[in-house]
Image (cartoon, coloured by chain):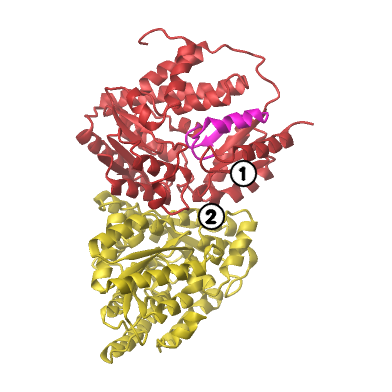
């Protein structure tokens, strides 16, 4: 309540493109819900899976993780997790997976019962959890599963690792040809890859805009507007949408219009958002003049090493080296880099009960990033979609104390 | 054999090494071998052995947590927490190196935490592929084995083809002996107590392997055969992580059951690592991981784990199945509901025990096992 009152003193400036964003995602989920109306086969795919070959082959990708985020944001996740737990799944498992399983078991969720996938595509570049999760769904739906194995990069990527992944990408194409009963078109794939690259570049430029003071877009906005980079990467829709969003944000920079009226403290966020509490946290921070200007999550879709001269090989490398598939030193460098490039006063790390790849190492990372940048960090305990593991008042107290420390330092 | 030893002495040697804590073990290790720690059967121990190392398996101890919570989030299993705690307490300072392999997300994180601490001079990440039924996996795995070989040769000692073949022979002998031990327990239930059995298995991951084969040979040859055995024990099958405490086996026996076989990562699963001796040793080491051995962290098709276990359980003659799972072990807990329903549909009742530090909640576990065994016992 206190935060609500103070919030009025630091108004949020809604992004106008949000209307277009809503229309875009509604259209996408409408297609997902009724794929046969559009003559589409549906592939369920992990968030780090290579989507470009799917779009090139005319299949429609559906992202259970993105849907999990939607369930979390609409506060439906806890009951869906309970349904999965009732079936025997442990409460300690990833709540994205539990949400998806619960949705399958009950037919409930923001868009109701999901259509049956025609096949599944799983990449372990984000975590090992997805292997088990997708095996369960392959058994439940009796559909084929393609698994892309991308060995974790503790220090550097080896040539034979790249060859291994590139070989699997060829297997992926063969798998799609078999499942979709049509030949793979190099030309179409190059077009989709080029659009994917354009989308990634636009997204990168959008995130970069928040290096300006004040930041035209806050990370809490980016968490919402990232849905097209995840689900529609490689389509014209995503390119058009991000051009529109970028244009609006560039206008904001010209007029020095920030995401919030007041921006006194700039912060970096690490880990997946706490989807069910984004709005409250945003208000709490804003009420103290604090804005999240960058994060490690939305920037994970900036595929730095995408080489378009040989798209298939280029994709293999790009998907192998994503943020979550790299070791602690890489993550520390990235946090230091974000803190310095965005002129941040500190950083907040979400120790996410559901995500080990993000959360293991955060305690060491916090100390190291602070040592290297001189900026303080705060760790808060929560879960990305399951609100049962969240103590909001405790987190609020921690954040208030943290902001006091930052104010004291500067 | 160096000298004639009695069964009593054999027993004493097994007990001695397994009753010590890590730091105390250091003085008991063979001086002519470099102690290299590892956690997982996906690390080819034969390669370490051939380089002149003592592969020393880190299996997690009951340990008072004082340092690890400052480095790890709460949702990590006992093995991860206790191993980092042991490292931070200096218990592992005797190790010259540690080899991690690619299994679950928590172990990946532990590898990073170990590297970050820089307490152990050498560290290597052996990247076992997660995809076991892809034709791409064997060439990749062979290159990883060669990469590990190069690392060991640079830091421990030369690995000759003859030396590697000799090491493979020793480990195969170990598996043959351990297999006999399992058969003996099935033939003469109760003859080898659960806690003794657990100690013998554990000793095999700590002692010099040549010495272990000698001790086990003696043990098997001289163990008095008692055809009557102890009757009335209900045969059960055990599924889970590492066998990190003899207490669990004792509890099962005290409740009137006997573990006849298992799919524990430190138990009978090890027997499936039998390595061919008639082909190139690198090829043989790689091949076994893709054919016989299956850890649920790996993908070999959506049904592989269920099918493997149903076959194993049916073969074992068990009347029921106990899941002994580390709390927070995502891999096992994801598979559990489908495994449970598959086993129960085939007439095998199941019991789930979620464990952390083996010294916790022993009383509660005991009551649950007793109730389960009573349910399985004939009226």
Task: Give the residue at x 43% y 87%.
Answer: A20
Identity of the residue furthest to the top in this view: B4
Q: Colour of chain B?
A: red
Task: Give the residue at x 69% y 38%.
Answer: B372
Identity of the residue furthest to the bottom in this view: A255
Residue at which label 1 appears: B352
Task: Give the residue at x 62% y 53%.
Answer: A88
Quick one: SS at disc 2?
loop
Quick one: SS at disc 1?
strand
Magenta-highlighted residues: B240-267
* Chain letter belonging to callout 2: A
* Residue A92: numbered disc: 2
Q: Colour of chain A?
A: yellow
Q: Is residue B176 left or right of residue B100?
A: right
Q: Nearer the viewer, residue B178 or A345?
A: A345
Task: Give the residue at x 50% y 15%.
Answer: B220
Q: Does residue B153 sit above or below A24 in this rendering?
A: above
* Residue B105: numbered disc: none
Q: Does residue A65 sit above or below B225 in this rendering?
A: below
Q: Is residue A299 visible?
A: no
């Amino acid at each position: 309540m206190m935060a609500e009152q103070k919030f009025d003193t630091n108004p949020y400036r809604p992004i106008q493109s949000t209307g277009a964003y809503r229309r875009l995602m509604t259209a996408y989920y409408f297609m997902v819900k009724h794929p046969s109306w559009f003559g589409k086969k549906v592939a369920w795919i992990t968030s780090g899976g290579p989507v470009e070959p799917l779009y090139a082959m005319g299949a429609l990708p559906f992202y259970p993780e993105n849907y999990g985020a939607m369930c979390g944001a609409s506060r439906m996740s806890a009951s869906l997790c309970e349904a999965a737990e009732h079936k025997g799944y442990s409460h300690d498992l990833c709540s994205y997976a539990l949400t998806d399983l619960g949705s399958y078991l009950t037919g409930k969720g923001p868009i109701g019962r999901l259509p049956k996938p025609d096949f599944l595509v799983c990449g372990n570049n984000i975590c090992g959890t997805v292997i088990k999760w997708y095996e369960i769904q392959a058994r439940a739906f009796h559909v084929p599963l393609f698994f892309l194995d991308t060995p974790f990069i503790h220090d550097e990527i080896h040539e034979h690792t790249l060859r291994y992944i590139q070989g699997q990408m060829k297997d992926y194409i063969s798998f799609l040809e078999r499942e979709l009963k049509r030949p793979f078109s190099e030309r179409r794939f190059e077009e989709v890859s080029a659009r994917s690259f354009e989308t990634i570049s636009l997204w990168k430029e959008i995130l970069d805009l928040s290096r300006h003071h004040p930041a035209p877009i806050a990370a809490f906005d980016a968490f919402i507007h990232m849905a097209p980079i995840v689900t529609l990467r490689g389509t014209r829709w995503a390119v058009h949408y991000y051009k529109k969003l970028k244009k609006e944000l560039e206008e904001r920079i010209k007029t020095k219009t920030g995401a919030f009226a007041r921006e006194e403290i700039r912060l970096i966020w690490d880990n997946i958002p706490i989807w069910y509490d984004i709005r409250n946290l945003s208000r709490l921070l804003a009420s103290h003049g604090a804005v999240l200007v960058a994060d490690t999550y939305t920037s994970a879709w900036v595929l730095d090493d995408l080489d378009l001269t040989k798209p298939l090989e280029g994709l293999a490398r790009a998907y192998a080296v994503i943020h979550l598939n790299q070791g602690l030193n890489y993550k520390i460098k990235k946090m230091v880099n974000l803190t310095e490039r965005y002129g941040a006063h500190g950083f907040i790390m979400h120790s996410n009960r559901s995500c080990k790849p993000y959360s293991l190492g955060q305690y060491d990372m916090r100390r190291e990033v602070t040592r290297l940048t001189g900026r303080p960090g705060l760790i808060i305990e929560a879960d990305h979609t399951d609100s049962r593991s969240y103590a909001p008042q405790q987190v609020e107290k921690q954040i208030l104390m943290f902001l006091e420390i930052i104010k004291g330092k500067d | 054999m160096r000298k004639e030893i009695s069964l009593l002495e054999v027993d004493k040697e097994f007990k001695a090494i397994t009753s010590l804590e890590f730091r105390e073990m250091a003085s008991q290790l063979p001086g002519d071998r470099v102690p290299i720690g590892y956690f997982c059967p996906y690390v080819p121990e034969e390669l370490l052995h051939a380089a002149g190392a003592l592969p020393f398996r880190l299996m997690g101890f009951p340990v008072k947590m004082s340092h690890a919570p400052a480095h790890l989030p709460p949702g990590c299993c006992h093995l991860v927490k206790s191993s980092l705690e042991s490292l931070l307490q200096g218990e592992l300072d005797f190790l010259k190196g540690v080899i991690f392999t690619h299994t679950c997300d928590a172990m990946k994180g532990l590898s990073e935490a170990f590297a970050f601490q820089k307490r152990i001079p050498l560290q290597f990440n052996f990247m076992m592929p997660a995809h076991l039924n892809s034709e791409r996996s064997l060439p990749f795995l062979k290159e990883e084995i060669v990469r590990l070989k190069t690392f060991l040769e640079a830091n421990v000692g030369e690995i000759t083809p003859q030396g590697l073949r000799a090491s493979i022979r020793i480990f195969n002998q170990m598996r043959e002996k351990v297999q006999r031990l399992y058969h003996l327990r099935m033939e003469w239930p109760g003859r080898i107590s659960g806690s003794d059995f657990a100690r013998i298995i554990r000793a095999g991951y700590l002692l010099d392997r040549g010495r272990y084969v000698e001790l086990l040979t003696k043990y098997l040859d001289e163990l008095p055969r008692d055809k009557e055995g102890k009757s009335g024990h209900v045969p059960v099958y055990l599924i889970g992580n590492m066998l990190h405490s003899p207490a669990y086996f004792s509890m099962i026996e005290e409740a009137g059951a006997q573990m006849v076989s298992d799919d524990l990562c430190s138990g009978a699963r090890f027997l499936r690592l039998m390595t061919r001796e008639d082909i190139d040793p690198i090829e043989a080491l790689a091949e076994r991981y893709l054919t016989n051995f299956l850890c649920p962290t790996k993908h070999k098709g959506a049904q592989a784990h269920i099918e493997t276990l149903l076959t194993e359980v049916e073969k074992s003659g068990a009347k029921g199945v106990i899941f002994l799972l580390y709390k927070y072990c995502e891999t096992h807990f994801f598979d559990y509901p489908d495994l449970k329903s598959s086993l129960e549909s085939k007439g095998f009742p199941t019991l789930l025990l979620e464990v952390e530090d083996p010294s916790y909640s022993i009383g509660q576990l005991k009551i649950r096992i007793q109730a389960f065994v009573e349910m399985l016992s004939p009226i």
